Image (cartoon, rainbow, N blue to C red):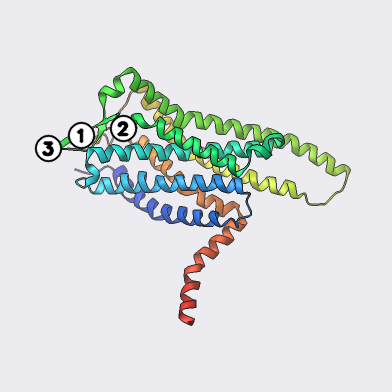
Amino acid sequence: MVRPIIVWIKEIYYPVLTAFGVPANLMTIIILSKGNCGLSKCISVYMMAMTTANLLVTIFNIMVYHIFTYHFPQSFLSYTAVCKLIVYVNCTTLDMSVWFTVSFTFDRFVAICSQKYKTKYCAVKTAATVLTTVSVLIYLEDIPFLFAFEHAGMVDNVHRGCRSSVAFFLSPAGAAYSWLQSVLIAWLPFALILLFNGLTVRYISIAGRVRRKLRCNNTENQKDPETDSRRKSIILLFTVSGSFILLWLTAAVSFLVNRVTNTVHYGDDHGKLAYIAAESGYMLMHLNSCTNACIYAATQTKFREELKKLAKSPYTFILKLDKN
């Protein structure tokens, strides 16, 4: 039997994504923790949180689930209790990645558009409180996933594997929770990010016209440090949120279609268009866990400098040992 091409792609794609994503996110965390990137402490806190969530997605959702569980089906990872725990952790890490991005977008919206609340809200303490609250709510909100799956079979009188519980998802509570998940993980974050970015663009366009008129009346051909700083912040905001929307869009549409049509994808559906579309969406969705490091390197000059220093540090250490 010829294996579907989507299976071949997944077997190559996820190991490559892990090989790049884990070191990239780790290096990003190390660089941001030093605080030498020329960013405010508040922005650094949100960037650290997003990078940590992306690292967890890379480790649990990609490496553990899509590589280890797939290639070692008879390992302890196949025990039903462990399988349920993996599913729960996968859901929480994805949710954190999504809502940390929304929190970052809202923070930048306040910083750019509301000078009145900027000092109070855009602070390290507030950022830590927001991120902690979001994390706790996500862990509580995803608890039903521990009961939404049942064992797939028995091996030596031990429950193995896990599959969607038909009784749970056909119940009114299960169906409502399924719809709630689709809204919370895809469409509500999309709507909020688009709303905040739209309001930010509107504010920037109005403020830009006012500043240009004032500068024309005063001095010409003089750099505006505030405008330059705001421009860098805006570029970072739009690239992070724009990348998220583009990479999550396919998965979000797939989630919605599955909920509307009540479609479930089983292991023997590899050749169906719906399965291919869903898996393509998942692959793009997981790619989002590796893009922020590239975005920071592309948009932040000091981040690139710190990245070069970090990349050279092992060689510098070896040269010092050699000289000694």
Q: Residue furthest top?
A: 172
Q: Residue at x 54, y 63 (%)?
A: 308
Q: Is residue 105 left or right of residue 163?
A: right
Where in the figure is residue 189, as x and y percent of width and height?
51, 32
Residue at image point 65% right, 48% down: 232
Question: Residue tagged by mark 1?
Answer: 152
In the rendered image, the vertical position of residue 48 relative to residue 307, given as above or below: above
Earlier in the chain: of badge 3 and badge 2, it is 2
> What is the CA distance from the residue labelled 1 to the residue labelled 2?
15 Å
Q: Residue type at mark 1?
A: Ala
Count the labels in the image.
3
Q: Which mark is residue 146?
A: 2
Counting from the top left corner in percent of width and height, residue 301 is at 62, 57
How far apart in space, not on screen, are marks 1 and 3 (Cα)?
13 Å
Question: Which amino acid lies under the numbered mark 3 shown in the image of this protein?
Answer: Asn
Q: Earlier in the sequence, mark 1 or mark 2?
A: 2
Kind of residue sitting beneath label 2: Leu
Where's residue 128, x and y in %? 54, 42
Circle 2: is it few (<14), some (14-19), or many (20+) Cα within 10 Å? Answer: some
Q: Nearer the viewer, mark 1 or mark 3?
A: 3
Q: Nearer the viewer, mark 1 or mark 2?
A: 2
- In the rendered view of the protein, which quadrant contains the N terminus? top left
Instruction: Tell me the SS state at disc 1.
Output: loop
Q: Earlier in the sequence, mark 1 or mark 3?
A: 1
| Residue topped by disc 3 | 157
Q: Quarter of the image holding residue 196?
A: top right
Q: Secondary structure at mark 3?
A: loop
* Camera-side residue of 120 and 287: 120
Q: Is residue 273 above or below residue 15?
A: above
